[in-house]
Image: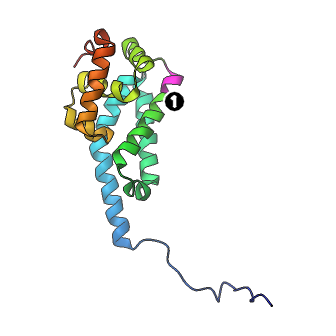
Amino acid sequence: MALPAARTEVDAPVTCHAPPRPALAAADLGYSAFAERNRPRYTRYAEARLAADARAASVVGATLTYARRNWTWLLSQPSPAADVWEELRFQVRCGCEETVPRDADMAVLYDRLPEASVDSVVLCRHLGLRVGEAAELMGLEPPAVKAGLGIARRALPHLADGVPG
């Protein structure tokens, strides 16, 4: 049996893979609102963890670039905030490898405890965020943040409670 003749570009059906313009505009608006709301809090978190404020700005910029490039995919995920928070953590870890941590006690916490527990301490105790706000930022439920605070307090109370807030 003979194979069908190959289609030429002229014969090929026209298909549109791009979302309609209103959908793109809504996605851009959604990303813009997300970035505007979270950039200051992401920056405070990165500054708390990194010695160089300029490095913190670079880390946050890279995180938000990741979010912008993957915004449509992120919106299809169960928790876009959690996925972007994971990217921020990754970027901060990379930044920590290039610079010394700003706070030696915080470095000990990150070495000895789960990252989510210490992030809860940093956000709630050091930066003064309410549990609900920290949970929203990390893409978690408030009980998970409370549990993280409890883990840190039980494991290293002299450090977890000693972080200024």
Secondary structure, mark 1, is helix
At which x and y percent is residue 125?
24, 22
Decide which of 10, 105 is in the foreground and name it.
105
Residue at the spot 73% in from the left edge and 85% down from the top edge: 6
Q: Is residue 161 left or right of residue 68?
A: left
Q: Amino acid under label 1?
A: Cys
Magenta extent: 94-99
Residue at the spot 32% in from the left edge and 42% down from the top edge: 139
Residue at the spot 52% in from the left edge and 80% down from the top edge: 15
* Quadrant location, the C terminus: top left
Residue farthest toward the top in the current orientation of the protein: 158
Density class for disc 1 (Cα within 10 Å; few <14, some 14-19, many ≥20) is: few
* Quadrant location, the N terminus: bottom right
Q: Is residue 7 left or right of residue 41?
A: right
Dominant SS of magenta comes to helix
Q: Against 72, is 159 above or below? A: above
Residue 10 sits inside the magenta stretch: no
At which x and y percent is residue 37?
27, 44
- State how the image is colored: rainbow
Q: Against 118, is 105 above or below? A: above
Residue at numbered disc 1: 94
Residue 95 sits inside the magenta stretch: yes
At which x and y percent is residue 103?
38, 15
Residue at the spot 33% in from the left edge and 12% down from the top edge: 156
Q: Is residue 29 left or right of residue 11?
A: left
Q: Is residue 102 visible?
A: no
Q: Against 4, is 24 above or below? A: above
Q: Is residue 161 visible?
A: yes
Decide which of 128, 62 is in the foreground and name it.
128
